Structure formats: C-alpha cells, structure tokens
C-alpha cells in the first residue's frame, strides 16, 4: 500500500482553489432563488387562505422527503424532457443551472419553515400597537417585525446555509466541476492514488467555508441583537 504524503495536501489545495468560485456561486444563486421562494411559501403558511396554506404544506412535505441526490437527478434528467414538451430546449444549458434549480427547490422548503417560525416568534401585540398609532401594514412589517424576525431567523439560516454547502458537493454527480468535482478528477487522474490526501484537502476547504459562515453570522446576529437587548432592558 502506498504511504501517506501530507505534503500532497497543499498541492491539492492549490489546484482546488481556482474552482472555489463555482461552489460559492452555486451557494449564492441557491440562496437568492431559494430564499425568494421560501419567503412566498412562508407568507402562504401564515396567511389565512386554506388553499395557499395547503399547497405550501404539500410542497414542503414532498421536497423535504426527497434525498438531495435523487432530486438532482430528477431535475437534471426530467426538466429538459418536461420543457421539451412545451417546445423549450434547455439541453444546451450549463450544469450549474440544474444544480441551482435543484437546491433552490430544496432550500426553499427549509427557508419557508425558518421564516415562518421567525415571524410567529414575534409578539402579535406589537402589530396591534403599531396599528393603534396609525402605521400601515407595510410600515409595521418593515420597521418593527422584520428586524426582530431577522434576529430570530439568523441561527437557523446559518445552519441551513452550512448544510447547503455540504449537500452542494453532490453537484459533481452530474459533472459540475466545483471543488468537489475537481477533487474527483484529480483522484481519477492519479488512478485512485492520493485519494486520502485529496479528501483531506477538500475537508479543509469545507471547514474554512463553514467557519467563515458561522463566524460572519455570529457577528451579524450579535450586532442586530443590540437593539433588542437595549429594548428589553429599557
């Protein structure tokens, strides 16, 4: 058996870094589109309409029961066939489109619950107080509810973001060359040699990304919580 070479880890890291932007771009795109859909789903759940609430619940239940890798294959192989029936050909579209679409679908379901729980955590009496002084529904939401919802949602949002980064490593299964995809290529080029060193290099990169996300959200949560603490001490 070939001996372990720690020095190769650094060599692999250097080769993986140029593909880090692909992983980051995938995460940003998913957060943008998945977050937007998650807001709509959360709004449907907190409103009184039975049909919209039922549809939102069905969407969330179905998507949360499907493993990420299966959803990725369904979207990658099924969406082009579905759209082709309407005369739309997306077979030439890059693999990143399918990755972002897949994880946006899954991320939206998680975000819907995060946003809903954060919204319902705010005391409803504050909305009544805002209405009593003549504030509109939009002013009440923007000035009073949104800041408090943000503080409540941040920890769960950060956890969902970390999980998204880890699950996003499955993108290599359809041929997307991000850091995980590049790592698999390196292992293949070496005929299976240095696999341990390559996976350790990937571990380091994902650890750094997770560390940056958690610390950034921790600082943001601490900053936004100052106003809430000051209000509670008043």
Image (spheres, rainbow, N blue to C red):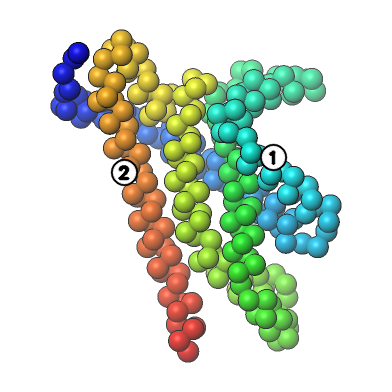
Q: Residue at x 55, y 70 (%)?
A: 148
Assign a secondary structure to mark 1: helix
Q: Residue at x 68, y 45 (%)?
A: 60
Q: Which residue is mark 1?
A: 62
Residue 53, how many percent across, how many down?
77, 54
Rate crowding at label 1 as few (under 14), some (14 to 19) or many (20 or more) other CA atoms within 10 Å.
few
Residue 163, how many percent across, how many down?
47, 43
Q: Is residue 198 above or below residue 192?
A: below
Asked whether residue 18 appears in the rendered view, the answer is yes
Label ID, residue 208:
2
Residue 181, how many percent across, how many down?
41, 24
Label ID, residue 118:
none
Q: Is residue 216 above or below residue 79?
A: below
Q: Quadrant of the N terminus?
A: top left
Q: Is residue 100 left or right of residue 80?
A: left
Q: Residue furthest bottom?
A: 234
Residue 51, how many percent across, how many down?
84, 52
Assign a secondary structure to mark 2: helix
Q: Is residue 186 above or below residue 62?
A: above
Asked whether residue 97 appears in the rendered view, the answer is no
Q: Residue at x 32, y 18 (%)?
A: 186
Q: Is residue 109 above or below residue 196?
A: below
Rate crowding at label 2 as few (under 14), some (14 to 19) or many (20 or more) other CA atoms within 10 Å.
few
Residue 50: quadrant of the picture: bottom right
Residue 71: quadrant of the picture: top right
């Amino acid at each position: 058996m070939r001996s372990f070479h720690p020095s190769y880890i650094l060599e692999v890291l250097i080769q993986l870094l140029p593909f880090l932007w692909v992983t980051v771009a995938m995460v940003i795109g998913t957060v943008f589109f998945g977050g937007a859909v998650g807001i709509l789903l959360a709004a449907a759940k907190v409103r009184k309409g039975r049909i919209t609430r039922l549809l939102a619940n069905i969407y969330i239940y179905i998507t949360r029961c499907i493993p990420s890798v299966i959803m990725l294959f369904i979207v990658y192989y099924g969406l082009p066939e579905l759209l082709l029936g309407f005369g739309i050909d997306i077979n030439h579209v890059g693999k990143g489109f399918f990755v972002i679409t897949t994880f946006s679908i899954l991320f939206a379901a998680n975000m819907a619950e995060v946003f809903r729980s954060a919204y319902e955590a705010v005391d409803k009496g504050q909305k009544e107080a805002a209405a009593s002084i003549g504030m509109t529904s939009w002013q009440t939401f923007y000035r009073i509810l949104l800041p408090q919802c943000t503080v409540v949602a941040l920890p769960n949002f950060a956890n969902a973001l970390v999980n998204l980064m880890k699950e996003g490593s499955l993108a290599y299964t359809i041929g997307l060359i991000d850091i995980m995809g590049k790592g698999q290529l390196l292992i293949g080029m070496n005929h299976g040699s240095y696999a341990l060193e390559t996976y350790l290099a990937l571990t380091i990169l994902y650890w750094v990304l997770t560390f940056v996300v958690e610390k950034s959200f921790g600082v943001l949560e601490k900053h936004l919580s100052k106003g809430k603490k000051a209000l509670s001490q008043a």
